[in-house]
Image (spheres, rainbow, N blue to C red):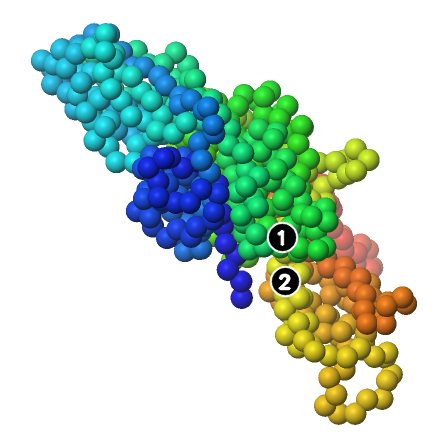
Amino acid sequence: MLHMRSLLVGIMTADGSATPNVPVIIGTQMQADDRFGVGSELSRMCRSFFRNNFANEMWCLPVLEPLGASAATGTITVSAPPTEAGTIHLYVGGQHLPINIAGTDTAEEVAQWMVDQIEDEENFLVSAEVDGTDPTQINLTANFKGVHGNDIRVELNYFGRLGGETLPIGLELTLPATNFLTGGVGVPRFEAAIRAMGEMEYDFVGMPYTDSTSLMAWAMEYGMSDIGRWGWMRQLFGSVFSARRGSYQDLIDFGLSRNDPVISVLAFEERTPTPMFEMTAAYVAKAQRALANDPARPLQTLQLLGCLPAQQNFRFNWMELNAMATSGLAIQKCWGGSAFPQIAREQTTYQLNLYGFGDDSWELVTTLHTLTKLIRLQRHAITSKYPRHKLANDGTRFGPGQAIVTPGIIKAELIAQYRIDEYNGLVEDARNFKRHLITERDPNNPNRLNCLYPPDLINQLRIFGVLAQFRLQYDRGIDVEIVGYGSQVYSGSAQGSRYAS
């Protein structure tokens, strides 16, 4: 019935052909590379999206590199040459680049060969060149300018010896001190881009910037105020998905600083190889694919394909994840044997009501999208059946064929639609819905029909609580028959007895 579009927001480079700040529909990676520039932030987001969702409509909103922005940089130095042939397993932003070298290569030759391989790789996040004064040093530069270049992680041998990844014997490489590129400066401004969206519906927005200014701009656009997309005047609905890396403390502090019912930020460990803008695209792709099919079904266990998690000993434990989930953050987890992060809870950042007290009414993304579908189905039912009708009181005796509705007719229509929604697993308890549903004419406007619509949203199985009380052996009831004197016979059961006599 509806498109239920997704919208990816990110930086395009100067060699992209797209018009900045104007949404454009994208169907293939080739189109993304042409419009946003090969290796750009938005092109890489499309790459991550297509790995996780090949079925749903996807649009992109390209923004220019910020004025005065700088690209992040880093260096790799060949400190010692190899003594045997082998393979360098280089990971840049979680993307694996195997580089084969000979045992006779010098340090300078290894450096040049690594540069050649990086430059030859398609849709890579960085460009590379040999340093002009030190031929053993490789200078890496992010393909786009901005602060997110600092999120590009450089590492070796992610899967380690067990995965068949070790440095060639004798070879020594020195990576950036923090394993991340540094020096990227600049956050794009979104005012013009948001205006260009107009009134087109975008139900799932992947917006990777989690600074306060960016989040505030999108929270205003998708908020519940009069001017927001959830407001009474616009009724466009939708929500925003993002991702953020950090330490346990940093993420808790961030989560407690936000309170937006329309924004969901998925938390990741500091050592996660994949950049957060690609994680954002994977998260929104999986959300769109699942929630478009069934908005009330939880997203837990859905894998973010193509995204590498932090290595085992650097992942958050359950206590940390639980604390983050109660601090306004969506969480992910790698269950045993999984190669990719899996969504564990699709939380929004909403935690407090207007008085600052705890409130879980808008806690889950499923609540937003279940309500969206219910309201749209309701509007479709009313506007399709009663597009040009007159309004009369209940009990009015109008002739057959008259295009007239009464509060009672509308109430019956809403109850019928609710029964369909219940059958489709969106709501429950139709009996009490019918009791609390109110439709009545407005006392001050005879052309207005007011409705109190109180759906009981279906819930999700998220916690399975078990109280385990073990036994070494269950007590056995032993039937005992006591024969008395005379004709009387007594029978009974000796419960819990060890012996019978």
Identify the residue at image location x=63%, y=69%: 380
Q: Where, by quadrant of the figure, is residue 294 drawn?
A: bottom right
Q: Mark 2: give few (<14), some (14-19) or many (20+) Cα within 10 Å.
A: some
Mark 1 vs mark 2, CA separation in Å: 10 Å
Q: Residue at x 52, y 39 (%)?
A: 207
Residue 292: x percent and y percent?
52, 56
Q: Which sits in the foreground, 161 or 140? A: 140
The answer to whether residue 406 is seen in the rendering is yes
Residue 287 in view in this figure: no
Give the camera-side residue of 220 and 474.
Answer: 220
| Residue type beneath disc 1 | Phe
Query: Tag on residue 237?
Result: 1
Label 1 with label 2: CB-CB less than 8 Å: yes
Element type where label 2 sits in the image: helix
Instruction: Classify mark 1: residues with Cα within 10 Å, few (<14), some (14-19) or many (20+).
Output: many
Give me the residue at 58% from left, 25% from top. 251
The residue to which callout 2 is attached is 376
Which type of secondary structure does the marked residue at label 1 adopt?
loop
Q: Residue at x 76, y 61 (%)?
A: 453
